[in-house]
Every structure is written in structure tokens, then in C-alpha cells.
Amino acid sequence: MNAAPVIPRAQAIANARRALDAARARRDADRAAGRLPDDVVLTLRRLERQQRTAPHHRAAA
């Protein structure tokens, strides 16, 4: 039996970050164009406000 190919950790993280950045860019473009429902915009504002006031914790990589 052949082992499944293994993606290096750094590559997996880079792939995930690229996908997340693309999703955020689409969300921001939709928000700027007014294509998001009002309840979603309110939720985004609430989350952004929480992030601004929360202490910054970064895990060591």
C-alpha cells in the first residue's frame, strides 16, 4: 500500500491563509457594494468592535 501524500505544515498553513484572505476580500467587496444583508453587516460591526477592544493574544508558532 502506498502512503497518502503528505502536505508540509508550512504549505498547508499557506494554503489555508490564501483561502481565508480570498474569502475576506470577497466579503469586503460585497460589503462595500452593499450586497450583504443588514443583519450580517451589524454582526460584522459587532465582531469588529469586539476585536478592537479585546486584548491581543498570539500563540507562538
Image (cartoon, rainbow, N blue to C red):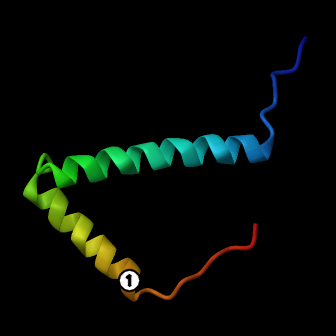
Q: Crowdedness of circle 1 by 10 Å Cα count: few (<14), some, many (20+)?
A: few
> Residue placed farthest to the top in the image?
1
Amino acid type shown at disc 1: Arg
Quadrant for the C terminus in the image: bottom right
* Secondary structure state at the residue bearing disc 1: helix
Residue 52 higher or lower than 36, as above or below? below
In the rendered image, residue 31, in percent from the top left (x then y), is placed at 20, 53
6 vs 59, left or right, is right
Q: Nearer the viewer, residue 32 or 57?
A: 32
x and y percentages locating residue 28 in the rendered image: 29, 53
Please name the residue that numbered disc 1 is placed on: 52
Position in image of residue 9 (x %, y %): 77, 45
State the quadrant of the N terminus: top right
Relative to 2, residue 28 above or below: below
Q: Residue at x 15, y 49 (%)?
A: 33
In front of the other: 30 or 13: 30
Residue 4 placement (x, y as % from top left): 81, 21
